[in-house]
């Protein structure tokens, strides 16, 4: 049997990390890039040159947006921009139109305003309506028809204190009662239906009892004969049961 070695704890130490491992190498080169911000290029032209920061190659931008133009000068030669004046394209300002013949020496009369308040223009699309409303109005009940209560006939309309009031002719009392009551055919039909329903309810109960008493013994006898033919034992009714069945048939 092999021997068991002695178990112990080794020496504790901190390994030394070399300097070349603590700082990883930089993969980006330290040389300056090729593209540099050298600023706005200046052309060595004697005098002054008009240029722009935006769209310098667009000739229309100098006229469309003159506020974005600026002048670059080298300072070695004086320069100026001459005036660009074309009489055919830009007429001079301040020229008044000629006066028409016949209007000299006569002052122009100004129209007199009828009211001191300024007139407000009427909006378009709104028709001009008369101040007085028509009588009768468009939604009024037509002449010759009955009023809402069915008690009078409208014979016309008149203006009373600025209001259009209908002129009524009262109907006789029998006519007013006839307006609120149904017609004779409706009354006859309703009365006939009610009479038939009442008669049917009265006659149906005794007639139903009579049919039930007549059919009941026939059904009993038929069931008894069927049981006898099938060989089943038929219970013999006692005298009391037979008398009870006969009394039931007499009712």
Image (spheres, grey):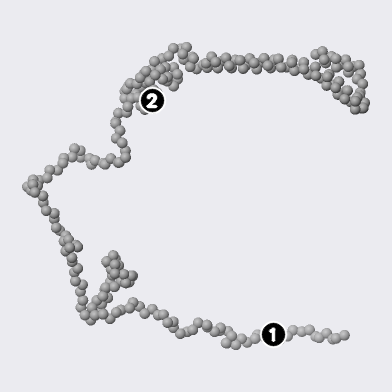
Q: Earlier in the sequence, mark 1 or mark 2?
A: 1
Percent of width and height locating residue 214: 80, 17
Q: Residue at x 85, y 14 (%)?
A: 246
Percent of width and height locating residue 40: 33, 77
Is 243 on the left or on the right of 155, as rendered?
Answer: right
Q: Which residue is mark 1?
A: 12
Q: Which residue is mark 2?
A: 140
Residue 67 shows up from this direction? no
Residue 112 occupies quadrant: top left
Is 192 on the left or on the right of 114, as rendered?
Answer: right
The circle drawn on residue 194 is: none
Q: Where, quadrant-wise, is the C terminus in this rendering?
A: top right
Percent of width and height locating residue 52: 30, 71
Is 29 on the left or on the right of 50, as rendered?
Answer: right
Residue 46 occupies quadrant: bottom left
For the residues bearing labels 1 and 2, Cβ distance under 8 angstroms: no
Percent of width and height locating residue 90: 19, 62
Local SS, label 1: loop
As rendered, which of 97 and 53 lies closer to the eye? 97
Is 7 on the left or on the right of 146, as rendered?
Answer: right
Q: Residue at x 52, y 82 (%)?
A: 27
Q: Comparing marks 1 and 2, which lies closer to the viewer?
A: 2
Local SS, label 2: loop
Q: Residue at x 37, y 18 (%)?
A: 155
Q: Residue at x 55, y 15 (%)?
A: 185
As rendered, which of 80 and 203 lies closer to the eye? 203
């Amino acid at each position: 049997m092999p021997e068991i070695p002695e178990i112990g704890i080794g020496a504790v130490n901190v390994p030394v990390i070399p300097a070349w491992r603590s700082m990883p190498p930089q993969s980006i080169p330290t040389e300056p890039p090729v593209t540099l911000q050298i600023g706005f290029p200046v052309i060595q032209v004697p005098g002054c040159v008009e240029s722009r920061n935006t769209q310098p190659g667009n000739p229309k931008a100098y006229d469309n947006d003159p506020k974005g133009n600026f002048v670059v000068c080298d300072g070695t030669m004086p320069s100026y921009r001459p005036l660009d004046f074309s009489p055919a394209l830009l007429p001079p300002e301040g020229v008044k139109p000629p006066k028409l013949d016949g209007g000299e020496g006569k002052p122009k009369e100004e129209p007199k305003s009828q009211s001191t308040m300024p007139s407000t223009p009427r909006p378009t699309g709104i028709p001009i309506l008369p101040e007085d409303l028509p009588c009768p109005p468009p939604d009024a009940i037509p002449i010759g028809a009955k009023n809402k209560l069915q008690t009078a006939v409208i014979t016309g309309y008149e203006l009373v204190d600025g209001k259009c009031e209908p002129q009524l002719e009262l109907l006789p009392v029998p006519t007013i009662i006839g307006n609120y009551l149904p017609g004779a055919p409706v009354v006859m039909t309703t009365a006939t239906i009610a009479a038939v329903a009442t008669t049917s309810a009265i006659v149906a109960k005794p007639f139903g009892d009579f049919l039930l008493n007549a059919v009941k013994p026939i059904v009993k006898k038929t069931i008894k004969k069927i049981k006898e033919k099938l060989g089943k034992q038929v219970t013999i009714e006692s005298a009391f049961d037979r008398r009870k069945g006969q009394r039931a048939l007499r009712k």
